[in-house]
Amino acid sequence: MIITLDGPCGSGKSTLAQMLAQKLGFFYINSGYLYRSLAYLLVHELGYDSLKLQNIAIEDITYLLHPDHFVYTYQQGIAQVFFKGLDITQYLKTAEVSSHASIISAYPYVRASIVPLQQHFATLYDLVTDGRDCGTEIYPQAGYKFYITATAHVRAQRLLQDLERKGAQASFQDVLDATLARDQRDMQRASCPLRKADDAIEIDTSAKTIDQVLEEMAHIISLQVV
Ligand code: DC
């Protein structure tokens, strides 16, 4: 069984997907982590800058994502990414990595290198996954598809709180601008843009708590939520 949650940044999809996976005892793939990891490693392992990210060498992607170096795990409810044995998860949620991940994910050759990782997990596990194109492109056969949204204002507020919790400084306007820029890139790119699958159920989380949304999803999936 595959359950997909797609939606824009700050919609709450990753938190919901992770909690749902835990309740079901399913594997969880945070597909944003895969794009974020690649963006992070290109810059911090191979010295790419913003300009060079616009022209990524295929062999660099192959090197970074080689299974001997790159490992995504989901254990005891926690998703982690390791590169050469080092846990890089803590570096993936910065504003810089968010923006770089959004930029590189528009390139078809980047997507083509991530998709096999996503599909491989589906051959091994029942899974819950979140991203932009999980229900439309990666797992069109998914048993349940959700499209998680919230207003840009609410999403920027949540992302700002996230940054502040990590000790980062930012203004609401800066976070809102970055959110709108990511939305535009993620929705308007030619390759696998963010869009609601025809058979996805849309949930607007703007005025709902995580628990309310989780309950709504569990009801739809007809689970006994403990
Ligand atoms: O879900 P997220 O915000 O962590 O994702 C970071 C970026 O990665 C997002 O701006 C677009 C890209 N992404 C994607 O293109 N496809 C996915 N399935 C997941 C993420």
Image: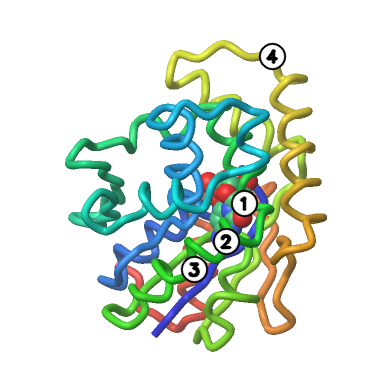
Give whichever of discs 4 and 2 has the lower sequence position: 2
Mark nearer the viewer, 4 or 2: 2
Residue 9: image x %, image y %?
A: 63, 45
On screen, residue 77 versus residue 200, left or right, reads: left
Residue on which disc 3 sits: 115
Distance CA(mark 4)–CA(mark 3) = 35 Å
Would you say the beta carbon of the disc 1 residue lies within 8 angstroms of ligand 1? yes
Instruction: Tell me if label 2 and label 1 are in contact, CB under 8 Å.
Output: yes
Instruction: Judge whether 180 appears above or below 195 on screen.
Output: above
Instruction: Judge whether 127 appears above or below 69 on screen.
Output: below
Please state which amino acid type lies under the numbered disc 3: Val
Instruction: Judge whether 150 appears above or below 177 on screen.
Output: below
Marker disc for residue 111: 2
Q: Quadrant of residue 19?
A: bottom left
**Circle 2 crowding by C-alpha within 10 Å: few under 14, some 14–19, many from 20:** some
Would you say the beta carbon of the disc 2 residue lies within 8 angstroms of ligand 1? yes
Q: Quadrant of residue 187?
A: bottom right
Mark nearer the viewer, 1 or 4: 1
Report helix, strand or loop for mark 3. Answer: helix
